[in-house]
Image (tube, rainbow, N blue to C red):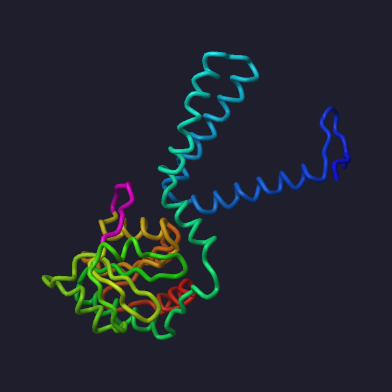
Amino acid sequence: MNQELFKFSFLSIRPFDILDILLVATVFYYLWKLTHNTRAARMWFGILLLLAFGMVARILNLRALSWILASLSAFWAVAFVILFQPELRRALSDLGRTPFSRRRISARLPDILVQACGELSRRRWGAIILIRRKNPVAHFIETGIPIHSDVSSELLVNIFAPNTPLHDGCVIIDGDRVIAARCVLPVVEERGPLGMRHRAALAASQETDAVAVVVSEETGQVSIAVEGDWLLFRGDATEIPTSLASSISARAQ
């Protein structure tokens, strides 16, 4: 297996070299898939730039720059873990997941959410609901108040009623159960027209594969965040589009 497969100029290619290239390409593709549409995606450019500087320094024999970059390399592993902590947690969760750990989404959940979001939209009551798919969301659940009740539109509407103890925060649904309410979610750094609920929904969908449903308190719009992007961003106080139910059904399997 160490024999040359073919030779190009001074470069000889062996079968193991092709396997090595494919494995490296797979790792980089998986890392890109985990980090695209996230804050970590912008950090890749800086890391690649440092690696390019290191290669140029070695080629040109720039001793001072090579020494500085070599000294910093001891801290790169720690910096990588700190910067990519959400993405690494998600990757390890994917690797450790088994078919037996997958939770089935209730078949009636989309209809319940459409009914609840419709009522919340008409009343202009703000809400954010996180639906677990595959990745665990225990670190979000720990920040809230345990509920452990069967999901229903009446329960969701009552939770988000203004001036009630549980209305401020996120409700987390796992399977056909409301696990917790008043949960605290991270918030994306981007500033703009989006409010805190929408920024929290984007952050939660970036950090996990959960589906985040948001009802705007100001406009009554119903929005769905999936994988750091908006799957649906429309709806009003009088009518919730039927695509909301189909979107949740497709994404929550």
Q: Residue at x 46, y 76 (%)?
A: 103
Q: Residue at x 64, y 51 (%)?
A: 26
Task: Tell me: 17 left or right of 253.
Answer: right
Q: Main secondary structure of the magenta part?
A: loop
Task: Tell me: 25 left or right of 196.
Answer: right
Quadrant in which residue 237 is drawn: bottom left
Q: Position of residue 24 (x, y in %)?
A: 66, 45
**Residue nearest the viewer, comparing 27 with 42:** 27
Q: Is residue 156 above or below residue 66?
A: below
- The magenta stretch spans residue 142: no
Residue at the limit of the structure toward the left, as seen here: 163
Q: Which residues are magenta?
A: 184-193
Q: Residue at x 23, y 77 (%)?
A: 122
Q: Is residue 34 above or below residue 124?
A: above
Q: Position of residue 96 (x, y in %)?
A: 52, 63
**Residue nearest the viewer, comparing 15 with 239:** 15
Q: Position of residue 44 (x, y in %)?
A: 50, 40
- The magenta stretch spans residue 188: yes
Task: Tell me: 10 left or right of 205.
Answer: right
Quadrant in which residue 172 is drawn: bottom left
**Residue nearest the viewer, comparing 76 with 241:** 76
Q: Position of residue 99 (x, y in %)?
A: 55, 73
Label tally: 0
Q: Residue at x 49, y 74 (%)?
A: 102
